[in-house]
Amino acid sequence: MKKVLLLLIVLCIFGCKKYVVSFEQPTEMKLDNLKLEVFLDKKKVQDINLKATNEMPTYQTAELSISDEGKHLLQVKTKDTTFSYDVNYPEEKYIVVTAHLINNGKLYIGIRKQNYKFRF
């Protein structure tokens, strides 16, 4: 029984591949309560509601599970626009998603990707 339990723990540690995605909570009050729908490989994985703050931005972190290494499609859908990004696992497994208002009033979702954890 101990061997089976040990094998299960080892498989979970090495078999679970995840993207760690941090969503920056904006400092722009016009973006308060903005709903983001997150899709990974065209499957909806999570809904995020942004909470605006007047101070330093905060971050909400989510772990998105994948089954294999290689190129994946990360999509973030807002009110009427979908932003699509290609991300590679494991080279880009830590991602920060930020929402910005452009001068013309349109919303833009940007991402930063890297292989090691971000420091906030």
Image (cartoon, rainbow, N blue to C red):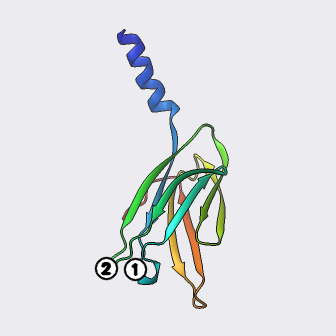
Kindly give the residue lying farthest to the bottom in the view shown: 103
- Quadrant of the snapshot with the C terminus: bottom left
- Quadrant of the snapshot with the N terminus: top left
Judging depth in this view, the residue of 79 and 6 nearest the camera is 79
- Secondary structure beneath disc 2? loop
- Secondary structure beneath disc 1? loop
Q: Residues within 10 Å of mark 2 (few under 14, many from 20)?
A: few
Evaluate if marks 1 and 2 touch, with contact meaning CB atoms under 8 Å apart. Answer: yes
Where's residue 62, x and y in %? 44, 53
Where's residue 30, x and y in %? 45, 83
Q: Is residue 77 above or below residue 1?
A: below
Please tell me which residue is depicted at 57% across the width and 71% down the height of the picture.
109
If you read the primary sequence from the N terminus, does the residue marked by circle 1 or circle 2 appear first?
1
Q: Is residue 68 above or below residue 105?
A: above
Please tell me which residue is depicted at 39% across the width and 64% down the height of the picture.
59
> Can you tell which mark lies on residue 27?
1
Q: Residues within 10 Å of mark 1 (few under 14, many from 20)?
A: some
Which residue type does callout 1 highlight?
Answer: Thr
Relative to 55, is 101 on the left or the right? Answer: right
Where's residue 48, x and y in %? 47, 61
> Can you tell which mark lies on residue 103?
none
Which residue type does callout 2 highlight?
Answer: Glu
Residue that carries the numbered disc 2 in the rendered image:
55
